[in-house]
Image (cartoon, rainbow, N blue to C red):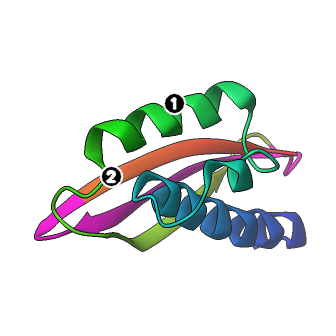
Amino acid sequence: MSAPMRQAAVFTDAALRRVLEVIDRRRPATQLRSLLAPNLVGAVLSVSEAVAGQHGTAVLRRVRLQPVGSSDSAAEVFGSYSRGDRIHAIAGRVER
């Protein structure tokens, strides 16, 4: 894995953990503003209002990155997290 992809993997892991913590209301949404586009912060807040406190705490389980193109400037992100007895998928894209 190239150095930019390793950096993207570290960023992605931290960002997804923060997103799940905001959804669970364990972290304030203001901490997402430096990581996500404004419309995505709004989407996370909407999800947070709908699912907060239901079925336990979300725990990130697995994260994988797939480079997009050959420039290492973007990657598709996919993974899974658990909440209670259920496993959920999560996906997105990171760009420089």
* Residue 67 percent location from the top left of the image: 70, 51
Q: What residue would you read off at disc 2?
A: 89
Q: Is residue 43 rendered to the left or right of residue 73?
A: left
Residue occupying image coordinates x 57% and y 63%: 27
Q: Which quarter of the figure is the N terminus placed in?
A: bottom right
Q: Is residue 71 above or below residue 18?
A: above
Q: Quadrant of the C terminus?
A: top right
Which of these two is toward me, 57 or 3? 57
- The magenta-colored residue range is 70-87
Above or below 57: residue 65: above
Mark carried by residue 43: 1
Magenta: main secondary structure equals: strand
Furthest toward the top, the residue is 39
Residue 62: quadrant of the picture? bottom left
**Image quadrant assignment for residue 82:** bottom left
Tell which tag, 1 or 2, sits nearer the viewer: 1
**Is label 2 in a helix, a strand or a loop?**
strand
Verify whether residue 85 appears in magenta.
yes
